[in-house]
Amino acid sequence: MGQQATPGRTARLGKAVGPEPTSVSGAVLLLPGGEEASARRPSPVWTTAIVRSLGRALARAGRAEGLAVHSVHYRYRGWNGSEAHLAADAEWAADEVVRRYGDVPVCLAGVDMGGRAALRTGGHEAVNSVVALAPWLPEEDVAAPAEPVKQLVGRRVLIAHGTNDERTDPELSFRFAARAKKVNREVCRFEVHSDGHGLHGHRDEVLCLASDFVMGALFGCPVSRPVEDALAAPPPIGLRMPLAAGFGKSLKR
């Protein structure tokens, strides 16, 4: 795929988070949130705190392994129905990683509507893993096709959602994970009890969880026991795994 553009608008990658490795062995694409429908341009400061924190945490965790972390700058704020603009820009960004760095594994890490974009674009040939934090997913409607899951076959998938999220429904991410688990055993979902959409209350634990998962998916590093158990457990156990307070304090890389 060539440059992802519309008249006057072009998706692009932000500069690498932290020092860019001299030799890149893997990449993470950070996909910020968005809106259900909007033709407006995203603001340069629109990226949320959790996305910035996630980028820094992943860059630190993967520095020795040659991990490059980039944010994706969308053309539009909105998903915009069948246009699925955020997913199209994520697809372009994965192509751009291949163009820049060659045949390296890619993780798509999205928040809110960016989580939907990450899950939708997981079938890209360069992608081997997906992280979706508090993902925005559409209401299930018998008159509309369900959000697809078959593109995630062969990918390792982590979803984490606050149980008190009032912006994106955690029950919808559970139902999505349950359908995805039927076609792909490598799906896990963690529940962040009492936390809201921004995952402020347990941010350190969420960042450690994501870093642990990504290092395992991209570079084959051993993952923590909770991640291992969640991936191995049948539904619903592995899809309602509680994220323990203090998770990650004993993890060492």
Image (cartoon, rainbow, N blue to C red):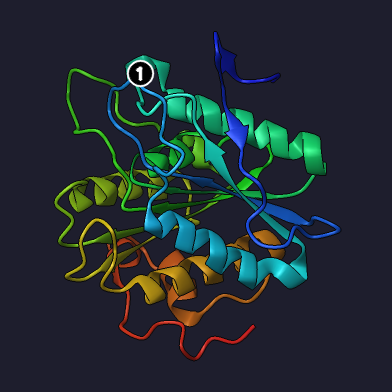
Q: Is residue 178 above or below residue 196?
A: above
Q: Position of residue 113 (x, y in %)?
A: 35, 39
| Residue 232 visible in this rendered orientation of the protein | no
| Element marked by disc 1 | loop
Q: Which residue is mark 1?
A: 39
Q: Quadrant of the N terminus?
A: top right
Front residue of this view, candidates 178 and 115: 115
Q: Is residue 91 left or right of residue 117?
A: right
Q: Position of residue 195 (x, y in %)?
A: 21, 67
Q: Quadrant of the C terminus?
A: bottom right
Q: Position of residue 233 (x, y in %)?
A: 39, 68
User: Pointer 1: residues within 10 angstroms few (<14), some, or many (20+)?
Assistant: few
Q: Residue furthest right?
A: 23
Instruction: Give the quadrant of residue 222.
Output: bottom right
| Residue 84 visible in this rendered orientation of the protein | yes
Q: Residue furthest top?
A: 7
Instruction: Give the quadrant of residue 199.
Output: bottom left
Instruction: Give the quadrant of residue 148.
Output: top left
Front residue of this view, candidates 195 and 120: 195
Residue found 41% across the figure and 32% down from its top: 42
